[in-house]
Amino acid sequence: MSPEAETKHVTLRWLSDLRFEGGEPNGPTVVIDADNTTAPGPMLQLLLAAASCGGADVVSILKKMQVGLESLDVEVAGLRRAEHPKRFTSIHFIWTIRGTGLDETKARRAIDLSIEKYCSVLHSLAPDIAVSYDLRLG
Amino acid sequence: MSPEAETKHVTLRWLSDLRFEGGEPNGPTVVIDADNTTAPGPMLQLLLAAASCGGADVVSILKKMQVGLESLDVEVAGLRRAEHPKRFTSIHFIWTIRGTGLDETKARRAIDLSIEKYCSVLHSLAPDIAVSYDLRLG
C-alpha cells in the first residue's frame, strides 16, 4: 500500500422495502431504491457515478482549455447480462456539450483524457465492459 | 447479445461547479457532487451502489429465510490508488444486521450469495479489486 493511498468511507442504512440511505459519516446523504421508484437503484447509480466522474473530468479539463462551458449532458446506456449476476457488459455514453471556444478536437481530447487517464470510476470497472461514446456539440 | 439482455438508460446534466443531476428519463433523480460538499461524489456513489446492491440482496434473501429484519447497516471502506487513475484496489464491508430468527449462518449465507451470485454492481467491478467483509449481529 502506498503511503499516499486514500481510503473512502461511507455508511449505508436500510430504511424499508429495498430503500437505503447513505453517504460519508457526517456528510450529505443520498437515497438508493433498488425498486427504482423513489430514487435510482444501485445499477442506475453505477451508471450515474461513471457519467458524473467523467463529467467532472470534462468540466475541469475544458475549463483549463479556456472553454466557457454553457451546458453538458450525458446520456448513458448500459447493457446488462440476462442471467445472474446481471452485470454490465457494455456502456455507451452520448455527450452533448455546448460552450464558447469549444470545438470537436477540444471536446474529444477532454473526454479521451477522462477515459484513458483520470476517471477513477471507469477504471474501477471490469476491463471486459466495453466503453464507447458519441459526441454532439450543442 | 442475448435477446433477454436489458439496457439501462440514464441521463445526467451538469448543474454548476462539479455538481450533476441525473436518473432514468422521467424517473426520480439524484444529485452527485464531485466536490463531495452538497452530495456524495462519484467514487462515494460507487461504494454506495455496491453496498445497496448487496443490501437489497441480503434483505430479499433474509426475507425468504423467514427472518424478521429489524435493522441493517453497512460500513464500507474503499482503498484508492494514490496515482491517476485513482481507482479502488480493495473494498471492505462491515455488515451490522439485527432481526428475529437471525443467526450468523443465515447472515453469512445471505451475504455470500450476494457476493458470489447476485450482486450485479460488485460483478461489474474489476476482478482485481479485493472484496472482503466482517459481520456483526446487532
Image (spheres, coloured by chain):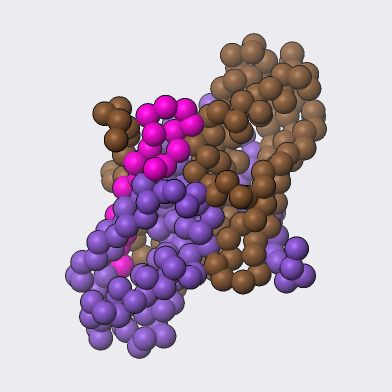
Chain colours: A purple, B brown
Is A59 placed above or below B48 here?
below
Q: Position of residue B107 (x, y in %)?
A: 72, 24
Q: For the view shown, which residue lies furthest in the top direction?
A: B66
Q: Where is residue B21 in the image (x, y as percent from the top left)?
A: 39, 57
Q: Can residue A10 be seen in this view?
A: no
Q: Which residue is drawn at 54% across and 34% down?
A: B119
Q: Residue at x 47, y 52 (%)?
A: A127
Q: Where is residue B87 in the image (x, y as percent from the top left)?
A: 58, 60
Instruction: Check if residue A88 falls in the magenta segment.
Output: yes
Is B55 placed above or below B39 here?
above
Instruction: Check if residue A29 falls in the magenta segment.
Output: no
Q: Is residue A74 left or right of residue B134?
A: left
Q: Which residue is drawn at 77% across and 37% down?
A: B134
Is B24 in front, or is A102?
A: A102
Q: In this view, does B21 lie to the left or right of A19?
A: left
Image quadrant holding the C terminus of chain A, namely bottom left
Is B115 in front, or is B73?
A: B115
Quarter residue A57 falls in: bottom left
Q: Where is residue A79 in the image (x, y as percent from the top left)?
A: 34, 41
| Magenta region, main secondary structure | strand
Q: Which residue is drawn at 36% across and 47% down?
A: A90
Q: Can residue A127 be seen in this view?
A: yes
What stretch of residues is rendered in magenta?
A72-89
Q: For the view shown, which residue lies furthest in the bottom direction?
A: A66
Image quadrant holding the N terminus of chain A, namely bottom right
